[in-house]
Amino acid sequence: MVYKTKGTCSQAINVEVENGIITSVQFVGGCAGNTAGIAKLVVGMNADDVIKKLEGTPCGMRKTSCPDQLARALKQLKTAQA
């Protein structure tokens, strides 16, 4: 799934989930080291756990961030798969 981000430096997140487990994450744009690190950390994790940990994470004065946008992408994907 390709999720178009809103309010962050990254433009999109490519994310794949199989049986509730995150199998692949790739951010398009954003802070390369940070987004690559987040992607590596969450692969193999349960999507619901990642949503709980990352949802609502701000970036500076912004009310959202790349981790928050990943949580939103996972929620959208979960809804689409239901």
Image: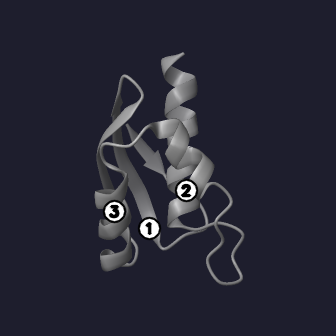
Q: Which structural element holds mark 1?
A: strand
The reply to whether residue 73 is in sight is: no
Nearer-the-camera pick, 73 or 34: 34
Residue 55 placement (x, y as % from top left) = 63, 54
Name the quadrant containing residue 68.
Answer: bottom right
Question: Which residue is rendered at x = 57% and y = 37% of the image?
Answer: 75
Looking at the image, can residue 40 be seen? yes
Residue farthest toward the bottom in the current orientation of the protein: 60
Instruction: Answer with left or right where residue 64 lies relative to residue 22.
Output: right
- At numbered mark 3, what does the secondary structure look like: helix, strand or loop? strand
Q: Amino acid at mark 1?
A: Ser
- CB atoms of marks 3 and 2 within 8 Å: no
Residue receiving disc 1: 10
In the picture of the structure, the residue carrying the numbered disc 2 is 69
Say which mark, if any, is on residue 33: none
Within the image, what quadrant is residue 16 found in? top left
Picture quarter with the C terminus: top right
Q: Amino acid at mark 3?
A: Val
- Give neighbour class at mark 3: few <14, some 14-19, many 20+ (Cα, 10 Å): some
Q: Which residue is mark 3?
A: 28
